[in-house]
Amino acid sequence: MRTSPSRGRSEPPASSKNGGAVKRIALIEDDADIAYTIRLNLRKEKRYQVEHYVSGLAALGALQEKPFDLVILDLNLPDIDGLALCRELRRADETRRVPIIMLTARVEEADRLRGLEIGADDYITKPFSPRELVARVQALLRRARPVSARGPNAMIRSGDIEIDPRSRTVRVESRPVQLTAKEFDLLHFLASHPNHVFTRDELMNRVWDFEFAGDTGTVTVHVRRLRQKIEPDPDRPRYLKTVWGVGYKFEPAQA
């Protein structure tokens, strides 16, 4: 039976396996079978409390009234487009930046790019493995701090690019460039390891803190977005280089 669109359906509070605080997850999904599978698999972990919404507008109201630790968002909702809802969630949550995982049946790269640009942290394409979804939830919640906050705070300068990990800002030709949180993390990580080639799986592990061997298309999308923002010619990148058959590296500008 589907949840009423006017309010969410909340699981009973769970006790964490390790005694830690139970994480509250907002699941925005109008397909009853998919929602049931997600809730069932998350409950098995004994550390998540899931509140289910079939209405995007009802979910938006709830998220503005009470805190959640993570949002799982279906892009195809009956009352509001998922991308528009993602944008509104980010606008209403500029300070906390609650992680958002998009669920989508859209396989076009343009749709993924739009979602990540708007502010989603990850996406999973339907049909998906429930085990993979749980792993991605765990990875996003496991990151207490951004990757860049764990490393040295030294300014990185290369050619026309300036990366400041303290303020988490990037400037290209002295002009500020607006990056999403994860775009900054990826750029700073690669630039902190110049000329080191990382596979997509390694980047998922090191930047996303995600060890499940699944879809690494998120990395590809983020690299493409970064090239559009920092490269003089994104089709012929100067800094973010592809090493065919292996992965990506940051190549410093020649002195």
Image (cartoon, rainbow, N blue to C red):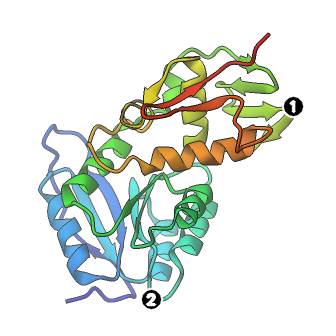
Question: Taking 196 as reference, is 148 above or below it?
Answer: below
Image position, residue 126 (x, y; %)? 32, 69
Who is closer to the viewer here, 205 or 14?
205
In the orientation shown, which residue stands out farthest toward the front? 244
Residue type, numbered disc 1: Glu
Q: Is residue 177 left or right of residue 220?
A: right
Residue 173 image label? 1
Marks 1 and 2 close (CB-CB < 8 Å): no
Q: Residue at x 42, y 39 (%)?
A: 208
Mark 1 residue element: loop
Q: Quadrant of the C terminus?
A: top right
Question: Taking 153 as reference, is 62 above or below it?
Answer: below
Q: Residue at x 41, y 37 (%)?
A: 200
Image position, residue 22 (x, y; %)? 25, 50
Q: Which residue is mark 2?
A: 78
Residue type, numbered disc 2: Pro
Mark 2 residue element: loop
